[in-house]
Amino acid sequence: MDRQTSESEQAAIRQAIMDYYHEGHVQSDPALYEQILHPDWRFALVIDGQLKLVARNEYLSWYNPQDADPGLNWETEFYSVDVTGSLASVKLRLECQTVRYIDYFHLVKVDGRWWIMHKMSHPVHKDP
């Protein structure tokens, strides 16, 4: 992959994450997540020293637009976006006043569209 193509794909990944994943948090809207989380998507996190794997439908059930808090200011910062052909890896920070997530995504490009296949996350809850 040449440099221009790689930069174009990195920009497409950043835009997709901002449009659907970041905005999914802002709006607490599962319909936005459905646009970027592949149907076979999995989420891995460690809670109290135990690995928890979460399927897409369970994750989507955690969100409801009626629960969106307009007082939260969500911010996303990309630390890295690495593309190899139709595969990519992303590390980012997603943060608001109450929590900071460091997320690691593995993505795949299928039919011209980038999908998040896997997510691992390290949450840090902030004191009120």
Image (cartoon, rainbow, N blue to C red):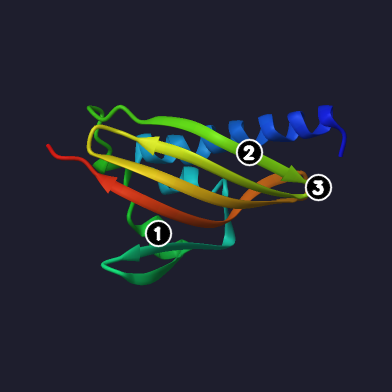
Circle 2 crowding by C-alpha within 10 Å: few under 14, some 14–19, many from 20: some
Give the SS element for disc 2: strand
Disc assigned to residue 100: none
* Depth check, front residue: 87 or 58: 87
Give the SS element for disc 3: loop
Q: Amino acid at mark 3?
A: Gly
* Quadrant housing the N terminus: top right
Q: Are marks 2 and 3 in contact (CB under 8 Å)?
A: no
Q: Amino acid at mark 2?
A: Val
Disc 3 or 1, which lies upstream in sequence?
Answer: 1
Horizontal side of residue 89 vs 21, given as left or right: right
Q: Is residue 113 above or below residue 27?
A: below
Q: Which residue is mark 3?
A: 85
Residue at position x 56%, y 46% from top?
35
Q: Are marks 1 and 2 in contact (CB under 8 Å)?
A: no
Q: Which residue is mark 2?
A: 81
* Depth check, front residue: 59 or 47: 47
Give the SS element for disc 1: helix
Q: Farthest left residue?
A: 128
Residue at position x 45%, y 63% from top?
44
Residue 109 image point, x, y percent: 73, 49
Residue at position x 67%, y 29% from top?
11
Q: Farthest right residue?
A: 2
Disc 1 or 2, which lies upstream in sequence?
Answer: 1
Q: CA distance from mark 1 to mark 2?
A: 24 Å
Q: Amino acid at mark 1?
A: Tyr
Q: Which residue is mark 1?
A: 59
Q: Is residue 51 above or below residue 87?
A: below
Q: Is residue 85 above or below residue 73?
A: below
* Quadrant housing the C terminus: top left
Residue 110 image point, x, y percent: 75, 52
Residue 18 image point, x, y percent: 52, 33
